[in-house]
Image: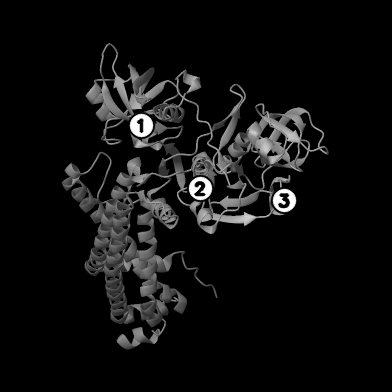
Amino acid sequence: MTTTKKPKGLVATLAILDLRHEWILTLCMVLAIAAVLAPLLILLGLKYGTIETMRERLIEDPVNREIKPARTLQLSSAWFDDFSKRDDVAFIVPTILRGSSIVRIIKKDHKYGNAVDLVPTAPNDPLILENGAIVPQAGECVLSYSASEELGIKTGDVVTARITRTRRGRREYVETPLKVTAILNPRADGLPRIYAPLQFVTDVELYREGQAVAARNWSGSQPRPFLSFDGAFVIHPARLSRIKMRMLTINTGLAQIEEINSEQFQQAMGFALPSTYSIYKLIAKGNTIQTTNIKRLKNKLRGQSAIVLPFVENLSLKLNQEIKIIGLSITAAEAKQLDIPALRWEKNSILLPDNIKYTSGKASALNGNIEFPITNVGKSFSKYAIVPIELIGSLKTGEKRNIIYDEKQNSFLLARAGYRGFRLYARSIDDIPALYRHFIENKIEVITKVQSIEKVKILDRGLTRIFWLVAIIGIIGGIAALIASLYAAVERKKRDIGILRLMGLSRSEVFRFPIYQGISIAIISVIVAIIGYASLSYIINFVFAADLRLGEKICFLPNEYFMIAFIATTSAAAMSSLLAAWKTTEIEPAEAIREE
Protein backbone atom coordinates (compact mmCIF):
# COMPACT_ATOMS: atom_id res chain seq x y z
CA MET A 1 0.00 0.00 0.00
CA THR A 2 1.40 3.38 -1.01
CA THR A 3 0.88 6.71 0.79
CA THR A 4 0.58 10.01 -1.00
CA LYS A 5 3.18 12.55 0.15
CA LYS A 6 1.61 15.86 1.20
CA PRO A 7 2.96 18.93 -0.60
CA LYS A 8 5.02 21.35 1.51
CA GLY A 9 3.14 24.36 2.82
CA LEU A 10 -0.22 22.72 2.27
CA VAL A 11 -1.73 23.97 5.54
CA ALA A 12 -0.42 27.52 5.04
CA THR A 13 -1.77 27.57 1.48
CA LEU A 14 -5.18 26.33 2.59
CA ALA A 15 -5.27 28.93 5.38
CA ILE A 16 -4.52 31.80 2.99
CA LEU A 17 -7.00 30.50 0.39
CA ASP A 18 -9.65 30.34 3.09
CA LEU A 19 -8.96 34.00 4.03
CA ARG A 20 -9.27 34.99 0.40
CA HIS A 21 -12.52 33.06 0.08
CA GLU A 22 -13.96 35.00 3.04
CA TRP A 23 -12.33 38.23 1.90
CA ILE A 24 -15.01 40.47 3.38
CA LEU A 25 -14.52 39.06 6.87
CA THR A 26 -10.75 39.12 6.36
CA LEU A 27 -10.88 42.77 5.24
CA CYS A 28 -12.92 43.71 8.31
CA MET A 29 -10.39 42.00 10.56
CA VAL A 30 -7.43 43.67 8.80
CA LEU A 31 -9.02 47.11 9.04
CA ALA A 32 -9.88 46.54 12.71
CA ILE A 33 -6.27 45.75 13.58
CA ALA A 34 -4.87 48.48 11.29
CA ALA A 35 -7.26 50.95 12.94
CA VAL A 36 -5.58 50.12 16.26
CA LEU A 37 -2.01 50.02 14.94
CA ALA A 38 -1.99 53.12 12.69
CA PRO A 39 -2.94 55.61 15.46
CA LEU A 40 -0.30 54.03 17.70
CA LEU A 41 2.31 54.60 15.00
CA ILE A 42 1.12 58.19 14.54
CA LEU A 43 1.23 58.83 18.28
CA LEU A 44 4.68 57.29 18.55
CA GLY A 45 5.82 59.29 15.52
CA LEU A 46 4.56 62.54 17.06
CA LYS A 47 6.29 61.70 20.35
CA TYR A 48 9.56 60.77 18.68
CA GLY A 49 9.50 63.60 16.14
CA THR A 50 8.57 66.31 18.64
CA ILE A 51 11.09 65.24 21.27
CA GLU A 52 13.88 64.69 18.75
CA THR A 53 13.21 68.08 17.15
CA MET A 54 13.42 69.78 20.53
CA ARG A 55 16.51 67.78 21.49
CA GLU A 56 18.21 68.55 18.18
CA ARG A 57 17.51 72.24 18.62
CA LEU A 58 19.01 72.11 22.11
CA ILE A 59 21.99 70.01 21.04
CA GLU A 60 22.55 71.89 17.79
CA ASP A 61 23.06 75.17 19.61
CA PRO A 62 26.15 74.85 21.86
CA VAL A 63 24.83 77.72 23.99
CA ASN A 64 22.43 75.19 25.53
CA ARG A 65 25.37 73.02 26.60
CA GLU A 66 27.20 75.93 28.21
CA ILE A 67 27.72 76.33 31.95
CA LYS A 68 28.92 79.65 33.37
CA PRO A 69 29.63 80.70 36.97
CA ALA A 70 27.11 83.07 38.52
CA ARG A 71 29.76 84.89 40.56
CA THR A 72 33.49 85.58 40.64
CA LEU A 73 35.59 82.58 41.67
CA GLN A 74 39.22 81.81 42.46
CA LEU A 75 40.22 78.71 40.50
CA SER A 76 43.69 77.23 40.11
CA SER A 77 45.22 75.80 36.95
CA ALA A 78 45.14 72.36 38.61
CA TRP A 79 41.35 72.68 39.00
CA PHE A 80 41.00 73.20 35.25
CA ASP A 81 43.34 70.30 34.48
CA ASP A 82 41.30 67.95 36.66
CA PHE A 83 37.93 69.14 35.40
CA SER A 84 38.88 68.87 31.73
CA LYS A 85 39.46 65.13 32.25
CA ARG A 86 35.80 64.46 33.10
CA ASP A 87 33.94 62.35 30.52
CA ASP A 88 30.94 64.69 30.56
CA VAL A 89 32.99 67.82 29.78
CA ALA A 90 33.63 68.59 26.10
CA PHE A 91 35.45 71.91 26.57
CA ILE A 92 36.51 74.24 29.37
CA VAL A 93 38.55 77.45 29.30
CA PRO A 94 39.32 80.01 32.04
CA THR A 95 37.87 83.51 31.90
CA ILE A 96 38.96 86.84 33.37
CA LEU A 97 37.17 89.54 35.32
CA ARG A 98 34.53 91.50 33.42
CA GLY A 99 36.21 94.78 34.39
CA SER A 100 39.48 93.69 32.77
CA SER A 101 37.95 92.26 29.59
CA ILE A 102 36.77 95.45 27.89
CA VAL A 103 38.90 96.47 24.88
CA ARG A 104 38.34 98.99 22.13
CA ILE A 105 38.32 97.60 18.59
CA ILE A 106 39.34 100.13 15.94
CA LYS A 107 38.81 99.57 12.24
CA LYS A 108 41.64 100.35 9.83
CA ASP A 109 41.93 104.07 8.96
CA HIS A 110 39.54 104.99 11.77
CA LYS A 111 40.51 107.02 14.83
CA TYR A 112 37.94 105.70 17.27
CA GLY A 113 36.31 102.33 17.69
CA ASN A 114 33.78 100.52 19.83
CA ALA A 115 34.23 98.96 23.25
CA VAL A 116 33.59 95.22 23.15
CA ASP A 117 33.90 92.38 25.62
CA LEU A 118 37.00 90.21 25.20
CA VAL A 119 36.32 86.48 25.63
CA PRO A 120 39.01 83.77 25.78
CA THR A 121 38.87 80.77 23.50
CA ALA A 122 41.03 77.70 22.91
CA PRO A 123 41.24 74.70 20.54
CA ASN A 124 38.01 72.65 20.22
CA ASP A 125 35.76 75.53 21.34
CA PRO A 126 32.23 74.32 20.38
CA LEU A 127 30.79 77.84 20.23
CA ILE A 128 33.36 78.74 17.56
CA LEU A 129 33.49 75.47 15.62
CA GLU A 130 29.72 74.86 15.52
CA ASN A 131 28.90 78.35 14.32
CA GLY A 132 30.74 78.57 11.05
CA ALA A 133 34.15 79.68 12.34
CA ILE A 134 37.62 78.40 13.16
CA VAL A 135 39.41 78.84 16.49
CA PRO A 136 41.72 81.88 16.24
CA GLN A 137 45.47 81.53 16.71
CA ALA A 138 47.99 84.07 18.03
CA GLY A 139 47.37 87.46 16.40
CA GLU A 140 43.86 86.46 15.29
CA CYS A 141 40.33 86.91 16.56
CA VAL A 142 36.71 85.99 15.86
CA LEU A 143 33.92 88.55 16.14
CA SER A 144 30.32 87.99 17.16
CA TYR A 145 27.76 88.93 14.53
CA SER A 146 26.62 91.90 16.62
CA ALA A 147 30.18 93.25 16.93
CA SER A 148 30.84 92.89 13.21
CA GLU A 149 27.63 94.77 12.36
CA GLU A 150 28.39 97.62 14.79
CA LEU A 151 31.97 98.00 13.56
CA GLY A 152 31.33 97.28 9.88
CA ILE A 153 34.01 94.57 9.87
CA LYS A 154 34.09 91.48 7.69
CA THR A 155 36.16 88.31 7.62
CA GLY A 156 39.78 88.95 6.64
CA ASP A 157 39.94 92.53 7.97
CA VAL A 158 42.75 93.57 10.28
CA VAL A 159 41.62 95.57 13.31
CA THR A 160 43.47 97.25 16.15
CA ALA A 161 42.75 96.27 19.75
CA ARG A 162 43.43 99.12 22.16
CA ILE A 163 43.83 98.24 25.85
CA THR A 164 43.71 101.14 28.30
CA ARG A 165 44.49 101.47 32.00
CA THR A 166 45.05 104.07 34.69
CA ARG A 167 48.34 103.71 36.62
CA ARG A 168 49.76 106.16 39.10
CA GLY A 169 47.17 108.71 38.10
CA ARG A 170 48.08 108.56 34.40
CA ARG A 171 46.07 107.10 31.55
CA GLU A 172 48.06 104.60 29.49
CA TYR A 173 47.25 102.33 26.57
CA VAL A 174 48.79 99.80 24.22
CA GLU A 175 47.63 98.68 20.78
CA THR A 176 48.00 95.40 18.95
CA PRO A 177 46.77 94.29 15.50
CA LEU A 178 44.37 91.35 15.18
CA LYS A 179 43.21 89.60 12.03
CA VAL A 180 39.49 88.73 11.92
CA THR A 181 39.37 85.09 10.80
CA ALA A 182 35.58 84.64 11.04
CA ILE A 183 32.24 86.15 12.02
CA LEU A 184 30.04 83.98 14.22
CA ASN A 185 26.52 82.90 13.35
CA PRO A 186 23.96 85.37 14.84
CA ARG A 187 22.54 82.64 17.10
CA ALA A 188 25.94 82.07 18.79
CA ASP A 189 26.18 85.38 20.62
CA GLY A 190 23.80 88.30 20.63
CA LEU A 191 26.28 90.67 22.32
CA PRO A 192 29.19 92.60 20.78
CA ARG A 193 32.14 90.39 21.68
CA ILE A 194 35.57 89.48 20.39
CA TYR A 195 36.97 85.97 20.86
CA ALA A 196 40.76 85.66 21.12
CA PRO A 197 43.31 83.07 22.34
CA LEU A 198 43.51 82.60 26.11
CA GLN A 199 47.14 83.82 26.31
CA PHE A 200 46.24 87.17 24.74
CA VAL A 201 43.25 87.58 27.05
CA THR A 202 45.27 86.86 30.20
CA ASP A 203 47.98 89.27 29.01
CA VAL A 204 45.32 91.94 28.65
CA GLU A 205 44.17 91.28 32.21
CA LEU A 206 47.72 91.58 33.55
CA TYR A 207 48.24 94.87 31.72
CA ARG A 208 44.92 96.26 32.96
CA GLU A 209 46.02 95.39 36.51
CA GLY A 210 49.17 97.48 36.08
CA GLN A 211 51.63 94.65 35.49
CA ALA A 212 54.22 94.37 32.77
CA VAL A 213 53.88 91.82 29.95
CA ALA A 214 57.42 91.23 28.79
CA ALA A 215 56.46 88.96 25.88
CA ARG A 216 54.53 91.84 24.27
CA ASN A 217 56.79 94.67 25.47
CA TRP A 218 53.96 96.14 27.52
CA SER A 219 55.44 98.11 30.39
CA GLY A 220 54.28 97.93 34.00
CA SER A 221 55.23 96.83 37.47
CA GLN A 222 56.43 93.40 38.48
CA PRO A 223 54.19 91.40 40.85
CA ARG A 224 56.59 90.76 43.70
CA PRO A 225 55.38 88.55 46.56
CA PHE A 226 54.40 90.24 49.79
CA LEU A 227 56.08 89.00 52.97
CA SER A 228 54.18 86.64 55.25
CA PHE A 229 55.01 85.53 58.80
CA ASP A 230 53.54 83.24 61.42
CA GLY A 231 54.00 85.84 64.15
CA ALA A 232 56.57 88.02 65.90
CA PHE A 233 58.77 87.98 68.98
CA VAL A 234 58.91 91.18 71.02
CA ILE A 235 62.21 91.56 72.90
CA HIS A 236 61.54 94.13 75.63
CA PRO A 237 63.97 95.53 78.24
CA ALA A 238 61.20 95.55 80.86
CA ARG A 239 58.40 93.24 81.81
CA LEU A 240 55.01 94.35 80.48
CA SER A 241 51.83 94.47 82.50
CA ARG A 242 48.82 92.47 81.34
CA ILE A 243 47.15 95.65 80.08
CA LYS A 244 50.21 96.61 78.01
CA MET A 245 50.45 93.04 76.68
CA ARG A 246 46.81 93.16 75.62
CA MET A 247 47.37 96.56 73.96
CA LEU A 248 49.83 94.89 71.57
CA THR A 249 47.02 92.72 70.15
CA ILE A 250 44.63 95.60 69.45
CA ASN A 251 44.49 96.66 65.76
CA THR A 252 47.69 94.79 64.93
CA GLY A 253 46.18 91.59 63.50
CA LEU A 254 47.97 89.59 66.21
CA ALA A 255 45.29 87.95 68.27
CA GLN A 256 47.28 86.07 70.90
CA ILE A 257 50.23 87.02 73.11
CA GLU A 258 52.18 85.03 75.70
CA GLU A 259 55.34 85.58 77.68
CA ILE A 260 57.99 82.92 77.02
CA ASN A 261 61.31 82.14 78.69
CA SER A 262 64.77 82.22 77.14
CA GLU A 263 64.82 78.43 76.64
CA GLN A 264 61.63 78.57 74.54
CA PHE A 265 63.06 81.42 72.47
CA GLN A 266 66.32 79.53 71.96
CA GLN A 267 64.39 76.44 70.84
CA ALA A 268 62.53 78.55 68.26
CA MET A 269 65.39 80.75 66.97
CA GLY A 270 68.46 78.68 67.82
CA PHE A 271 70.38 81.35 69.76
CA ALA A 272 70.21 82.79 73.27
CA LEU A 273 69.37 86.32 74.41
CA PRO A 274 70.70 88.29 77.38
CA SER A 275 68.80 87.32 80.52
CA THR A 276 67.81 90.95 81.18
CA TYR A 277 65.17 90.89 78.45
CA SER A 278 61.53 89.87 78.62
CA ILE A 279 60.34 87.90 75.59
CA TYR A 280 56.80 87.86 74.19
CA LYS A 281 55.43 85.73 71.40
CA LEU A 282 52.54 87.10 69.33
CA ILE A 283 50.64 85.08 66.73
CA ALA A 284 47.57 85.45 64.53
CA LYS A 285 45.24 82.50 65.10
CA GLY A 286 44.81 80.39 61.98
CA ASN A 287 46.35 83.00 59.70
CA THR A 288 49.57 84.72 58.71
CA ILE A 289 50.61 88.32 59.21
CA GLN A 290 52.27 90.73 56.79
CA THR A 291 54.61 93.71 56.98
CA THR A 292 51.71 96.07 57.71
CA ASN A 293 50.99 94.10 60.89
CA ILE A 294 54.64 94.34 61.92
CA LYS A 295 54.63 98.11 61.34
CA ARG A 296 51.54 98.53 63.54
CA LEU A 297 53.20 96.48 66.27
CA LYS A 298 56.38 98.57 66.08
CA ASN A 299 54.34 101.78 66.29
CA LYS A 300 52.82 100.60 69.57
CA LEU A 301 56.33 99.94 70.93
CA ARG A 302 57.83 103.21 69.75
CA GLY A 303 60.22 104.76 72.30
CA GLN A 304 60.38 101.62 74.48
CA SER A 305 63.74 100.25 73.16
CA ALA A 306 61.93 97.07 72.18
CA ILE A 307 62.97 94.91 69.22
CA VAL A 308 60.44 93.11 67.00
CA LEU A 309 61.57 89.90 65.29
CA PRO A 310 59.06 88.42 62.78
CA PHE A 311 59.32 84.65 62.56
CA VAL A 312 58.27 81.76 60.34
CA GLU A 313 57.89 78.31 61.84
CA ASN A 314 58.94 74.98 60.33
CA LEU A 315 60.48 76.21 57.07
CA SER A 316 63.47 74.45 55.54
CA LEU A 317 65.76 74.61 52.51
CA LYS A 318 67.37 71.79 50.61
CA LEU A 319 71.00 72.38 49.72
CA ASN A 320 73.08 69.23 49.80
CA GLN A 321 70.78 68.21 52.66
CA GLU A 322 67.56 69.39 54.29
CA ILE A 323 68.23 72.22 56.78
CA LYS A 324 65.93 74.31 58.97
CA ILE A 325 66.12 78.06 58.44
CA ILE A 326 65.16 81.15 60.40
CA GLY A 327 64.80 84.69 59.08
CA LEU A 328 66.61 87.60 60.69
CA SER A 329 67.18 91.16 59.48
CA ILE A 330 68.19 93.70 62.14
CA THR A 331 70.19 96.89 62.33
CA ALA A 332 73.72 97.06 63.73
CA ALA A 333 72.38 98.82 66.85
CA GLU A 334 69.80 96.07 67.41
CA ALA A 335 72.47 93.40 66.95
CA LYS A 336 74.65 95.09 69.56
CA GLN A 337 71.67 95.36 71.90
CA LEU A 338 70.98 91.60 71.56
CA ASP A 339 74.68 90.72 71.77
CA ILE A 340 74.77 88.93 68.42
CA PRO A 341 76.97 89.56 65.34
CA ALA A 342 75.86 92.33 62.97
CA LEU A 343 74.19 91.11 59.79
CA ARG A 344 75.29 92.51 56.43
CA TRP A 345 73.06 90.69 53.99
CA GLU A 346 73.62 90.25 50.30
CA LYS A 347 70.80 89.08 48.03
CA ASN A 348 69.97 85.39 48.43
CA SER A 349 72.65 84.80 51.05
CA ILE A 350 72.71 82.42 53.98
CA LEU A 351 74.64 81.80 57.19
CA LEU A 352 75.25 78.10 57.76
CA PRO A 353 76.15 76.14 60.90
CA ASP A 354 79.63 74.54 61.03
CA ASN A 355 78.32 71.08 60.25
CA ILE A 356 76.96 72.17 56.85
CA LYS A 357 79.57 72.36 54.09
CA TYR A 358 78.23 74.48 51.26
CA THR A 359 79.53 77.46 49.27
CA SER A 360 77.03 78.45 46.55
CA GLY A 361 74.57 76.94 44.12
CA LYS A 362 70.86 76.20 43.86
CA ALA A 363 68.58 75.82 46.83
CA SER A 364 65.09 74.36 46.65
CA ALA A 365 62.14 74.99 48.94
CA LEU A 366 58.42 74.33 49.30
CA ASN A 367 58.78 70.60 48.58
CA GLY A 368 60.94 71.27 45.55
CA ASN A 369 58.38 73.53 43.87
CA ILE A 370 60.80 76.45 43.59
CA GLU A 371 64.54 76.77 43.03
CA PHE A 372 66.77 79.83 43.41
CA PRO A 373 70.49 80.62 43.75
CA ILE A 374 71.95 81.03 47.23
CA THR A 375 75.40 81.82 48.59
CA ASN A 376 76.97 81.00 51.95
CA VAL A 377 78.34 84.28 53.36
CA GLY A 378 79.48 83.14 56.79
CA LYS A 379 78.97 81.12 59.91
CA SER A 380 75.60 81.01 61.65
CA PHE A 381 75.51 82.03 65.32
CA SER A 382 72.31 79.95 65.61
CA LYS A 383 72.01 76.18 65.56
CA TYR A 384 69.83 76.78 62.47
CA ALA A 385 70.75 78.38 59.15
CA ILE A 386 69.94 82.10 58.98
CA VAL A 387 68.57 83.90 55.91
CA PRO A 388 67.31 87.47 55.37
CA ILE A 389 63.79 88.07 56.67
CA GLU A 390 62.75 89.10 53.13
CA LEU A 391 63.71 85.66 51.80
CA ILE A 392 61.91 83.63 54.45
CA GLY A 393 58.86 85.93 54.24
CA SER A 394 58.65 85.42 50.46
CA LEU A 395 58.90 81.64 50.87
CA LYS A 396 56.14 81.71 53.49
CA THR A 397 53.91 83.51 50.98
CA GLY A 398 54.77 80.75 48.50
CA GLU A 399 53.00 78.22 50.72
CA LYS A 400 49.64 79.79 49.76
CA ARG A 401 50.42 81.62 46.53
CA ASN A 402 52.31 80.47 43.47
CA ILE A 403 55.68 82.18 43.28
CA ILE A 404 58.50 81.85 40.76
CA TYR A 405 62.11 82.96 40.70
CA ASP A 406 63.02 85.18 37.73
CA GLU A 407 66.65 84.66 36.80
CA LYS A 408 66.83 87.87 34.74
CA GLN A 409 65.55 90.06 37.55
CA ASN A 410 67.23 87.91 40.23
CA SER A 411 64.05 88.15 42.25
CA PHE A 412 60.96 86.26 43.40
CA LEU A 413 57.79 87.10 41.50
CA LEU A 414 54.17 86.24 42.12
CA ALA A 415 52.83 83.79 39.57
CA ARG A 416 49.24 83.96 38.47
CA ALA A 417 47.06 83.24 41.49
CA GLY A 418 44.33 81.59 39.45
CA TYR A 419 41.35 82.38 37.28
CA ARG A 420 38.12 84.13 38.13
CA GLY A 421 35.70 82.02 36.10
CA PHE A 422 35.25 79.60 33.21
CA ARG A 423 33.38 78.78 30.01
CA LEU A 424 32.34 75.12 30.05
CA TYR A 425 30.46 73.03 27.49
CA ALA A 426 29.04 69.62 28.33
CA ARG A 427 29.35 66.78 25.84
CA SER A 428 25.56 66.43 25.70
CA ILE A 429 22.51 68.16 27.11
CA ASP A 430 21.95 64.94 29.07
CA ASP A 431 25.18 65.69 30.99
CA ILE A 432 24.03 69.16 32.09
CA PRO A 433 21.93 68.06 35.13
CA ALA A 434 24.78 65.95 36.58
CA LEU A 435 27.30 68.76 36.10
CA TYR A 436 24.86 71.24 37.61
CA ARG A 437 24.43 69.07 40.69
CA HIS A 438 28.22 68.69 40.99
CA PHE A 439 28.72 72.46 41.05
CA ILE A 440 25.89 73.02 43.53
CA GLU A 441 27.29 70.33 45.84
CA ASN A 442 30.65 72.15 45.73
CA LYS A 443 28.93 75.47 46.51
CA ILE A 444 29.61 76.97 43.06
CA GLU A 445 26.59 78.79 41.68
CA VAL A 446 26.29 78.37 37.93
CA ILE A 447 24.04 79.48 35.07
CA THR A 448 22.76 76.70 32.79
CA LYS A 449 19.86 75.77 30.52
CA VAL A 450 19.07 72.89 32.86
CA GLN A 451 15.44 74.00 33.19
CA SER A 452 14.89 73.86 29.42
CA ILE A 453 16.50 70.44 29.29
CA GLU A 454 14.40 69.18 32.19
CA LYS A 455 11.24 70.41 30.42
CA VAL A 456 12.11 68.27 27.39
CA LYS A 457 12.71 65.26 29.62
CA ILE A 458 9.43 65.81 31.48
CA LEU A 459 7.60 66.11 28.15
CA ASP A 460 9.28 62.94 26.93
CA ARG A 461 8.24 61.03 30.06
CA GLY A 462 4.69 62.38 29.84
CA LEU A 463 4.27 61.46 26.17
CA THR A 464 5.75 58.02 26.85
CA ARG A 465 3.15 57.37 29.58
CA ILE A 466 0.31 58.55 27.33
CA PHE A 467 1.57 56.40 24.47
CA TRP A 468 1.76 53.25 26.56
CA LEU A 469 -1.63 53.92 28.15
CA VAL A 470 -3.25 54.22 24.73
CA ALA A 471 -1.14 51.37 23.33
CA ILE A 472 -2.08 48.93 26.11
CA ILE A 473 -5.78 49.67 25.70
CA GLY A 474 -5.56 49.38 21.91
CA ILE A 475 -3.46 46.22 21.98
CA ILE A 476 -5.80 44.52 24.44
CA GLY A 477 -8.78 45.41 22.26
CA GLY A 478 -7.05 44.23 19.07
CA ILE A 479 -6.00 40.93 20.65
CA ALA A 480 -9.49 40.34 22.02
CA ALA A 481 -11.03 41.02 18.61
CA LEU A 482 -8.58 38.69 16.88
CA ILE A 483 -9.11 35.92 19.44
CA ALA A 484 -12.88 36.20 19.10
CA SER A 485 -12.72 36.28 15.31
CA LEU A 486 -10.47 33.25 14.94
CA TYR A 487 -12.32 31.26 17.59
CA ALA A 488 -15.64 32.03 15.91
CA ALA A 489 -14.18 31.01 12.56
CA VAL A 490 -13.16 27.61 13.98
CA GLU A 491 -16.64 27.10 15.45
CA ARG A 492 -18.17 28.04 12.11
CA LYS A 493 -15.89 25.73 10.15
CA LYS A 494 -16.09 22.56 12.25
CA ARG A 495 -17.39 20.59 9.26
CA ASP A 496 -14.62 21.90 6.97
CA ILE A 497 -11.91 21.12 9.50
CA GLY A 498 -13.44 17.66 10.04
CA ILE A 499 -13.22 17.05 6.29
CA LEU A 500 -9.58 18.08 6.36
CA ARG A 501 -9.03 15.52 9.11
CA LEU A 502 -10.79 12.88 6.95
CA MET A 503 -8.46 13.82 4.10
CA GLY A 504 -5.48 12.90 6.26
CA LEU A 505 -4.40 16.08 8.06
CA SER A 506 -3.11 15.38 11.54
CA ARG A 507 -4.03 17.26 14.72
CA SER A 508 -0.75 19.22 14.62
CA GLU A 509 -1.44 20.32 11.05
CA VAL A 510 -4.95 21.59 11.72
CA PHE A 511 -3.53 23.20 14.91
CA ARG A 512 -1.40 25.43 12.68
CA PHE A 513 -4.36 26.40 10.47
CA PRO A 514 -5.67 29.34 12.60
CA ILE A 515 -2.12 30.35 13.53
CA TYR A 516 -1.23 30.85 9.87
CA GLN A 517 -4.41 32.82 9.38
CA GLY A 518 -3.70 35.05 12.41
CA ILE A 519 -0.14 35.78 11.21
CA SER A 520 -1.37 36.49 7.68
CA ILE A 521 -4.00 38.92 8.96
CA ALA A 522 -1.32 40.61 11.14
CA ILE A 523 1.13 41.03 8.23
CA ILE A 524 -1.52 42.61 6.01
CA SER A 525 -2.67 44.80 8.92
CA VAL A 526 0.87 46.09 9.55
CA ILE A 527 1.29 46.95 5.88
CA VAL A 528 -2.03 48.82 5.83
CA ALA A 529 -1.15 50.58 9.11
CA ILE A 530 2.26 51.70 7.78
CA ILE A 531 0.63 53.05 4.61
CA GLY A 532 -1.89 54.91 6.77
CA TYR A 533 0.89 56.24 9.01
CA ALA A 534 2.96 57.39 6.02
CA SER A 535 0.00 59.28 4.56
CA LEU A 536 -1.03 60.97 7.81
CA SER A 537 2.58 61.83 8.85
CA TYR A 538 3.16 63.49 5.47
CA ILE A 539 0.03 65.59 5.96
CA ILE A 540 1.03 66.52 9.54
CA ASN A 541 4.56 67.52 8.53
CA PHE A 542 3.21 69.49 5.58
CA VAL A 543 0.76 71.39 7.79
CA PHE A 544 3.48 72.32 10.31
CA ALA A 545 6.22 72.91 7.72
CA ALA A 546 6.14 76.68 8.26
CA ASP A 547 7.05 76.23 11.94
CA LEU A 548 9.93 73.80 11.28
CA ARG A 549 13.49 74.28 10.14
CA LEU A 550 14.91 72.66 7.04
CA GLY A 551 15.12 68.90 7.56
CA GLU A 552 12.97 68.87 10.71
CA LYS A 553 9.82 66.73 11.02
CA ILE A 554 7.23 66.83 13.76
CA CYS A 555 6.04 63.29 12.98
CA PHE A 556 8.81 60.85 12.21
CA LEU A 557 9.84 57.29 13.03
CA PRO A 558 13.16 55.52 12.27
CA ASN A 559 12.91 52.34 10.17
CA GLU A 560 13.69 50.08 13.12
CA TYR A 561 10.39 51.11 14.73
CA PHE A 562 8.46 49.62 11.78
CA MET A 563 10.36 46.36 12.17
CA ILE A 564 9.52 46.36 15.89
CA ALA A 565 5.84 47.00 15.04
CA PHE A 566 5.88 44.13 12.53
CA ILE A 567 7.45 41.65 14.95
CA ALA A 568 5.26 42.72 17.87
CA THR A 569 2.03 42.54 15.85
CA THR A 570 2.73 39.14 14.29
CA SER A 571 3.82 37.76 17.68
CA ALA A 572 0.62 39.06 19.28
CA ALA A 573 -1.43 37.57 16.45
CA ALA A 574 0.27 34.19 16.83
CA MET A 575 -0.38 34.22 20.58
CA SER A 576 -4.01 35.28 20.00
CA SER A 577 -4.66 32.36 17.67
CA LEU A 578 -3.57 29.70 20.16
CA LEU A 579 -7.05 29.35 21.68
CA ALA A 580 -8.59 28.81 18.26
CA ALA A 581 -5.74 26.43 17.35
CA TRP A 582 -6.34 24.41 20.48
CA LYS A 583 -10.04 24.22 19.59
CA THR A 584 -9.22 22.64 16.19
CA THR A 585 -7.46 19.73 17.88
CA GLU A 586 -10.79 18.74 19.54
CA ILE A 587 -12.54 18.37 16.16
CA GLU A 588 -12.73 14.72 15.11
CA PRO A 589 -13.17 13.44 11.51
CA ALA A 590 -16.56 12.12 12.59
CA GLU A 591 -17.76 15.73 12.89
CA ALA A 592 -17.84 15.95 9.08
CA ILE A 593 -19.87 12.67 8.80
CA ARG A 594 -22.37 13.81 11.45
CA GLU A 595 -22.85 17.09 9.57
CA GLU A 596 -23.69 15.06 6.49
Work out which quarter of the rendered image holds the N terminus and state it. bottom right
Extreme residue toward the bottom, this view: 594
Q: Please tell me which of labels 1 and 2 falls first in the chain.
A: 2
Residue at image coords 47%, 64%: 8
- Per the model, the C-alpha gap separating discs 1 and 2 is 28 Å
Image: 346 above or below 340: above
Q: Please tell me which of labels 3 and 1 falls first in the chain.
A: 1
Q: Identify which amino acid the numbered label 2 is placed on.
A: Arg
10 Å neighbourhood of mark 1: few (<14), some, or many (≥20)? Answer: many
Q: Is residue 329 visible?
A: no
Q: Identify which amino acid the numbered label 1 is placed on.
A: Ser
78 or 54, which is in the foreground? 78
The picture places residue 506, in percent across and down from the top left corner, at 46, 77
The picture places residue 191, in percent across and down from the top left corner, at 26, 34
The picture places residue 303, in percent across and down from the top left corner, at 53, 41
Q: Is residue 144 left or right of residue 123?
A: left
Task: Give the structural element (helix, strand or loop) at label 2.
Answer: loop
Image: 14 above or below 355: below
- Per the model, the C-alpha gap separating discs 3 and 1 is 51 Å
10 Å neighbourhood of mark 3: few (<14), some, or many (≥20)? Answer: few
Image: 523 above or below 219: below
Which residue is identified by label 1? 101
Which residue is identified by label 3? 267
Which residue is identified by label 2? 86
Q: Is residue 3 left or right of residue 349?
A: left
Q: Identify which amino acid the numbered label 3 is placed on.
A: Gln
Comparing labels 1 and 2, the label whose residue is closer to the camera: 1
Extreme residue toward the top, this view: 109
Residue at image coords 54%, 58%: 242
